[in-house]
Image: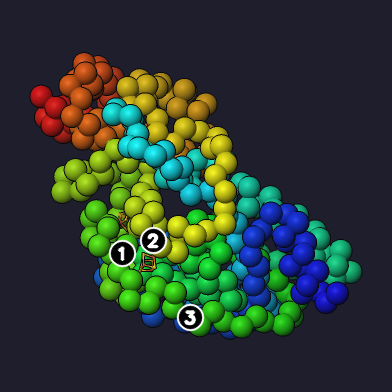
Amino acid sequence: MSLKAKIKAGAESLGFVAIGFTSVEPVPGLQRFKGWIDAGRHAGMAYLASQRSLETRSDPRKLLPSCRTVISLLSAYPPPRDRGSEPLPGSGRIAAYALQSDYHDVLTRRLEKLVELIAEMAGRQVETYACVDSSPILEKGYAQQAGLGWIGRNSLLYNPEYGSWTNLSELLIDLEVDPDLPFEVDGCGECQLCVRACPTQAIMPDRTIDARRCLSYLTIENRGVIPVEFRKAMGNRVFGCDQCQSVCPVNKKTRVKTREPVIEDFPDLAESISLSEEEYKLKYRHTPVWRTKFAGFRRNIAIAMGNSGQKRFIPLLEKALTDSPDPVVADAIAWALKELI
Ligand code: SF4
Ligand code: SF4
């Protein structure tokens, strides 16, 4: 068995569902990334626009000078559960990827184990750099170049078998491994379903997302107020948004089976607004929902309550307002009360 085949088998044994190899040479996508930054579509994620971010994206050898190969790895997560009917009135909705244990921790551990396996296979120590999600590399470009899929109109990587219900990670490594063929087919064809379904028109014609309009960014990374013009569109989303993925025909045929989430996908809003910071921490610390922090979570819950039409939430919101020194949360609660009164 070749070293490449052994690495693939080792990665699969650790739970990665698709693995591809490409050389460390720059991949297409840098100009699109720079254009996205220049247009301000990265919103408050200033770290993406730093000199370092642009340098490492143009050449990953800035992260690992001895790098010869980029290994792209996909991990799959279950799509949102099909409840057969709308969730109970008065519940929120959490994006599917966030219902499992925090993928940063899971994937970092998996990559560490993979490095050990590769060192055994190669018969020497290997120099590596592990990238999970926020690392400054054009990860979708490398994944496409490594044959794992195409970049869909909603900017996500689509794999023919697993759709976009995946997390990407990369291992930069100092071994030279035969590259795979790039994925050349555009699986989107003439389809525009995600563009039409996006509740805030955040999907741009060049297959990028305007984060300033995207509910996923606004409810997670954004630490400030959510602009009033997008609050109605949030509906009951309290963490992230699966809309553009849920309508995608490719995603309807994926292989990942439903498995029990580690947190509830439709949390009760009344219970959620009443959580203390300690209770929030206990419940969400080891899931991606921790990312939005306590204030962001309460802000999102308050807006979902405002969108619920449920007057029974008014006393809970009034109590939360007196308990909330955070101006961002107070602003969301005041808005929700106005919607309900
Ligand atoms: S995640 Fe939601 S808001 Fe963001 S682009 Fe997709 S559908 Fe639009
Ligand atoms: S909904 Fe259509 S256009 Fe959007 S990513 Fe899926 S296939 Fe591509």
Could you tell me residue 93's position as x and y percent? 37, 38
Q: Residue at x 17, y 21 (%)?
A: 311
Whichever of labels 3 and 1 marks the residue nearer the N terminus, that label is 3
Across and down, in percent, residue 141 comes to 50, 74
Q: Secondary structure at mark 1?
A: helix
Query: What's the amino acid at mark 1?
Result: Leu
Residue density around tag 3, few if under 14, some if 14–19, many if 20 or more, within 10 Å: few
Q: CA distance from mark 3 to mark 1?
A: 18 Å
Q: Please tell me whether mark 2 sits on a helix, a strand or a loop.
A: loop
Mark 2 lies on residue:
248
Query: Type of residue at label 3?
Result: Val
Q: Is the residue marked 1 within 8 Å of ligand 2, measured from its CB?
A: yes
Picture quarter containing residue 330?
top left
- Numbered circles on residues, count: 3
Label of residue 185 in the image:
3
Q: Quadrant of the C terminus?
A: top left
Q: Residue at x 38, y 51 (%)?
A: 242
Residue under numbered circle 1: 193
Badge 1: how crowded within 10 Å, few (<14), some, or many (20+)?
some
Residue in front for this viewpoint, 42 or 257: 257
Q: Horizontally, is 257 left or right of 217 in the view?
A: right
Q: Quadrant of residue 179?
A: bottom right
Distance of label 3 from label 2 (alpha carbons):
17 Å
Residue contact at pointers 3 and 1, CB within 8 angstroms: no
